[in-house]
């Protein structure tokens, strides 16, 4: 197994001790990772298996009820019937995050295509312009969209000024508002991998396809799409993942009825003080995120192998 | 043949124009309306004023108003003593966590590149986790951990929380720089009689420096921008600027928050702009010479 992991390395001349010169540099980072990442993660997983204390905190009594609640299973001891409210929250978050990812792809693909066809200098400038707003504070970018979509916001002011409507439309506090705010947040995550894929695409293949009589649609479907698939998959995952667990956009722009996973998680810890349940939500969310990233990594490896 | 082509090209460039408008209009709008002299309805344009900025400066203790600012009667009500401490907390936290993360991340990258040990690739992959895990999960697990060891929430806890994932970012950036580096330069230095420390100081470090500075600047921006992790780990007394702004936006108190937002964008853009400039590709440097 070791040979497969380090196959670029020359074969070690003899068995080396586990601790080697130069490994001291790794100690601070390793300690940081263990103490402030791994242990907190394991504590959350442990808490998710415990019982909630009467005044917050946890009681050391092992049970899987937090997970049962997420998946809507009934519990006779707690007089609880089938109840899919939390599964519904997960499903709604997944739908909103998927819509965000797909719309970001539709907006980003032509832009990435255009950028990839420019000369080196323009490529760099345009990619710089795509990335730059991303570094404006995330909260401020959501706030900008609140100012646009509020009842007394810019868009309603414009629509009413033009006489298109006589009363402010309900734009904010809707799933669509959350989708727009998250698209705005994560567009670079889509454009950059798309650009990387499209740039590698050999234009002569497109010409060949057209010369052989394929129409534009057929060429796109049979040549462009398959060849840019690694970028599309990466972009979709990179937008879906942070949108799915997003806290900011749904908290500030989502409707009160449309609770999403991120705000649910914050509520469980900050207001309900139900740590085992919050920990279980957190564990399920992390599991889903890691699964998505695993799928992405596999599809990338497959594309490289071909 | 040429007609549909021209049409397609027109559609594409229109799309790209709209795309960049979508990216920049919201920020431009925020900047414009931060100068709006309307204390009652902040999205209805009334006139131009610098007063919201002057008021922010006054709240930061950098300026004493010499004339009545917009909404002067209500200035007392809006004047916010929390802004100054929040700004100071953010700066202290961003600089310390970025400094710590740069040192730790660079050492990790060097260790991973130069030493082979079992499980190296697994560790390298694991170091991506703090970047990819949702920030709210990271914030909550740190909150649970700190609470269970009775660690007081404050500046120190936020600095530690930020250092964890910033070190991973720095590791990625410096590793990329290291993998593009010619190892023969280090070998040549050793062959010419330089010790390991001299080689590091005179050869490796100068070559890595753009990556290290880039990682440091990026870390400052990410820490300065972070709301979610600070929200869970800062406690009551050490509110950072984004946490303060989050509260202000929810209460929607005053157009002053527009000015604060624009100033925050300005700080982030300046730092990131200089980081990207340091990492600009070779052609632009050649063009300058």
Image (cartoon, coloured by chain):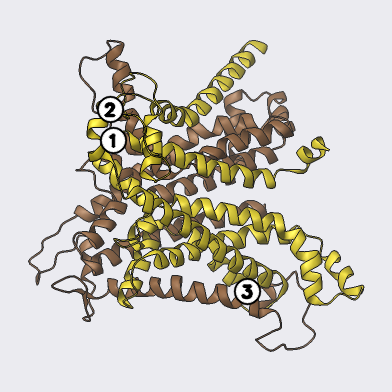
Chain colours: A brown, B yellow
The answer for which chain carries disc 3 is B
> Residues at marks 2 and 3, common chain?
yes
Residue occupying the point 57% across, 52% down? B218
- Residue carrying label 2: B39
Can you see residue B105? Answer: yes
> Residues at marks 3 and 1, common chain?
yes
Tally of marks:
3
The answer for which chain carries disc 2 is B
Q: CA distance from mark 2 to mark 3?
A: 59 Å
Q: CA distance from mark 3 to mark 1?
A: 52 Å
Q: Residue furthest front?
A: B66
The answer for which chain carries disc 1 is B
- Residue carrying label 3: B120
Kindly indicate whether the residue at mark 1 contacts the one at mark 2 (C-beta within 8 angstroms).
yes
Question: Which SS class for mark 3?
Answer: helix
Location of the N terminus of chain A by quadrant is bottom right
Q: Earlier in the sequence, mark 2 or mark 1?
A: 2
On the rendered structure, is A8 left or right of B19?
Answer: right
- Residue carrying label 1: B254
Local crowd at mark 3 within 10 Å, few (<14), some, or many (≥20)?
Answer: some
Measured as percent of width and height from the top left, residue A166 is found at: 21, 14
The residue closer to the viewer here, B37 or B185, is B37
């Amino acid at each position: 197994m070791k040979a497969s992991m380090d196959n670029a390395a020359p074969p070690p001349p003899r068995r080396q001790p586990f601790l080697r010169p130069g490994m001291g540099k790794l100690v601070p980072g390793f300690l940081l990772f263990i103490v402030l990442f791994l242990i907190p993660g394991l504590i959350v997983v442990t808490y998710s298996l415990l019982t909630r204390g009467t005044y917050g905190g946890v009681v050391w009594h092992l049970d899987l009820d937090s997970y049962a609640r997420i998946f809507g299973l009934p519990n006779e001891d707690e007089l609880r019937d089938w109840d899919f409210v939390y599964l519904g929250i997960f499903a709604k978050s997944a739908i909103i995050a998927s819509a965000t990812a797909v719309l970001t792809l539709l907006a980003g693909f032509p832009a990435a295509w255009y950028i990839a066809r420019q000369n080196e200098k323009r490529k760099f400038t345009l990619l710089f312009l795509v990335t730059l707003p991303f570094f404006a504070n995330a909260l401020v970018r959501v706030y900008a969209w609140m100012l646009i979509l509020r009842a007394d916001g810019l868009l309603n002011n414009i629509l009413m000024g033009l006489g298109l409507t006589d009363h402010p439309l309900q734009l904010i506090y809707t799933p669509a508002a959350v989708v727009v705010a998250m698209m705005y947040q994560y567009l670079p995550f889509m454009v950059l991998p798309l650009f990387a894929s499209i740039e590698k695409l050999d234009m002569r293949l497109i010409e060949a396809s057209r010369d052989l009589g394929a129409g534009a649609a057929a060429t796109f479907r049979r040549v462009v799409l398959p060849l840019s698939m690694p970028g599309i998959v990466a972009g979709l995952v990179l937008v879906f993942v942070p949108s799915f667990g997003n806290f900011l956009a749904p908290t500030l722009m989502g409707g009160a009825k449309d609770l999403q996973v991120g705000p649910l998680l914050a509520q469980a810890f900050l207001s309900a003080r139900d740590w085992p349940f919050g920990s279980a939500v957190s564990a399920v969310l992390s599991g889903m995120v890691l699964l998505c990233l695993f799928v992405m990594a596999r599809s990338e490896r497959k594309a490289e192998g071909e | 043949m040429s007609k549909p082509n021209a049409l397609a090209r027109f559609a594409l460039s229109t799309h790209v124009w709209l795309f960049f408008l979508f990216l920049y209009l919201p920020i431009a709008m925020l900047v414009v309306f931060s100068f709006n002299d309307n204390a009652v309805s902040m999205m209805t344009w009334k006139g131009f004023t610098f007063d919201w900025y002057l008021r922010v400066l006054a709240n930061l203790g950098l300026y004493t108003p010499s004339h009545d600012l917009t909404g002067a009667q209500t200035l007392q009500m809006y004047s916010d003593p929390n802004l100054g401490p929040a700004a100071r907390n953010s700066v202290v936290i961003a600089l310390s966590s970025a400094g710590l993360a740069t040192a730790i991340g660079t050492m990790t990258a060097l260790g991973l590149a130069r030493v082979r040990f079992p499980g190296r690739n697994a560790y390298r992959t694991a170091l991506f986790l703090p970047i990819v895990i949702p920030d709210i999960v990271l914030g909550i697990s740190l909150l649970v951990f700190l609470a269970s060891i009775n660690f007081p929430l404050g500046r120190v806890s936020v600095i530690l929380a930020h250092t964890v994932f910033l070190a991973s970012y720095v590791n990625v950036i410096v590793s990329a720089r290291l993998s593009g580096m010619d190892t023969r330069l280090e070998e040549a230095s050793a062959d010419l009689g330089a010790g390991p420390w001299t080689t590091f100081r005179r050869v490796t470090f100068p070559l890595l420096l753009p990556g290290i500075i880039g990682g440091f600047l990026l870390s400052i921006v990410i820490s300065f921008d972070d709301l979610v992790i600070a929200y869970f780990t800062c406690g009551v007394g050490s509110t950072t600027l984004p946490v303060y702004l989050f509260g202000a936006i929810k209460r929607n108190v005053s157009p002053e928050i527009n000015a604060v937002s624009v100033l925050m964008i300005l700080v982030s853009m300046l730092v990131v702009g200089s980081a990207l400039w340091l990492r600009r590709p070779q052609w632009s440097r050649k063009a300058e010479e």
